[in-house]
Amino acid sequence: MTQLPDTTTPTVRLHTITENEAGQRVDNFLLRMCKGVPKSWVYRVVRKGEVRVNKGRVDVTYKLEIGDVVRIPPVRVSEVAESLVPKHRATALPIIYEDDALLVIDKPAGLAVHGGSGVSFGVIEQLRAAYPKLKFLELVHRLDKETSGLLVLAKKRAALVYLHEQIRNGQMDKRYYAILKGELTQTVTHVKAPLHKYVAPNGERRVVVAHEGEGQSAHTQFNIEQKLSGYTTVRVKIFTGRTHQIRVHSASIEHPIVGDEKYGDFELNKKLAKTTGGRMFLHAHMLRITHPISGEILSLTAPIPQAFAQFIDNVQASAS
C-alpha cells in the first residue's frame, strides 16, 4: 500500500488499487487514505477534477477496480490521526473468533464503534492501532456505544462485501439479551412498527416510531427469559437491522431497556445508577453467519456480562 509522505510539503501521489481496496467508492477510498481530511475536501477535489483514475475524471460514486491508478492531489495529511489512540489503548479487544478473513470481538459497553461526534476514537481505530500490519480492517455492522457484545470486522474486502450481502438479504441471525422495565405478560411479543430517523436540534441522532406508511419497516421479537419483581429479562431476535431498533421498540410497548439514557425511563435510571454502574442492559449475545470464504455456518456467542447477573441478584434480594 502507498505510504504517506514523510515530508511536510504535500505532493501528488499515484496509488495502484489492490485486491483489498477494489470495490469501494472513490470518496471512501480518499477518506481512508487521507486521514483527517473533511468530506467536503474530498467532494471538492473530485468535483474539480484534481482526483483522476487512470488519468480520467470520475464521480465520487465510481467504484475502484483492481489495477486502477488513482491520482491523489496534494493534501496536508493529519500527522496526529494515528495518535488519537493512546498507546495504552492500542490493544486488542476480547476476541470471540479470528481467522484470515474475519475478526469477531466482544465489544464492551461504553465504547463507540468509531470516532466522531465528540468521540476521538472507537473500536475500529483502536483495533487498527492494535493490528498495524493488517492492510484492511473494516466494520461489517455497528453496535450502539451503550450496547455490549458481538461485533464483526472484515480483514478482506471480499469478506466485507459478502457479509454486507448477507445483511441485505436478512441472512445474518442476530440475537440479544436485555433487561426491560416492567413485567411482560406474553411469552413471545412481536413488535412490527416502522422507524424514522431524525436529528434533534442539539445534533443528537434519534429514532421514533413512524406513522403507518412512513419510515422504514422494522420487526423485533421479545421472548421472556425470566420474570423478576418489576423487570423482565428477555431474549431478543431482530428481523431487520434498523438504528436503535430494539431500544425504540421496547420503549414503544412501555417496557424500555433498563439503563437506556436516550429512550428509557429517566427517573428509574437515575434511581438505579448506583446498582447498574451506569450501563444499559442490552447485549449482543449470539450471531449466526455464513463464513465468506469457507461457506461454513458460524454460530458465535459472547458471554452475558457479570453486570446482568449482579443486577438480577440485587432485584431478587430486594424482593425477598
Image (cartoon, rainbow, N blue to C red):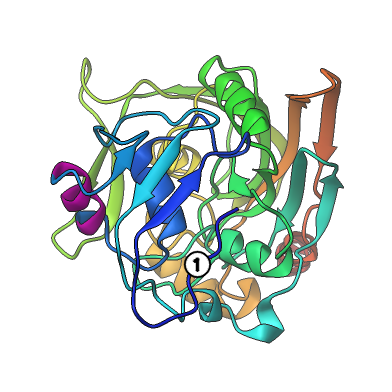
Residue depicted at 44% across the width and 31% down the height: 64
Residue 44 visible in the snapshot: yes
Residue depicted at 59% across the width and 47% down the height: 138
Q: Is residue 63 above or below residue 38?
A: above
235 relative to 49 in the view: left or right: right
Asked whether residue 46 is drawn in magenta, I would say yes
Relative depth, front residue between 159 and 9: 9
Where's the C terminus, which quadrant? bottom right
Residue depicted at 26% across the width and 32% down the height: 58
262 relative to 268 in the view: left or right: left
Residue under circle 1? 4
- Name the image quarter holding residue 88: bottom right
In the rendering, at what x and y percent does residue 13 appear?
41, 57
In the rendering, at what x and y percent does residue 241 appear?
49, 31
Relative depth, front residue between 244 and 79: 79
Residue 226 visible in the snapshot: no
49 relative to 292 in the view: left or right: left
Is the residue marked by circle 1 packed among few (<14), some (14-19), or many (20+) residues within 10 Å? some
Residue depicted at 55% across the width and 63% down the height: 3
Secondary structure at badge 1 equals loop
**What secondary structure do most residues of the magenta stretch adopt?**
helix
Q: Is residue 252 above or below residue 103?
A: above
Relative depth, front residue between 34 and 144: 34
Asked whether residue 320 is drawn in magenta, I would say no
> How many numbered markers are drawn?
1
In the rendering, at what x and y percent does residue 150 appear?
71, 46
In the rendering, at what x and y percent does residue 149 appear?
69, 51
Residue type pointed to by label 1: Leu
Magenta residues (range): 41-47
Q: Is residue 152 above or below residue 221?
A: below
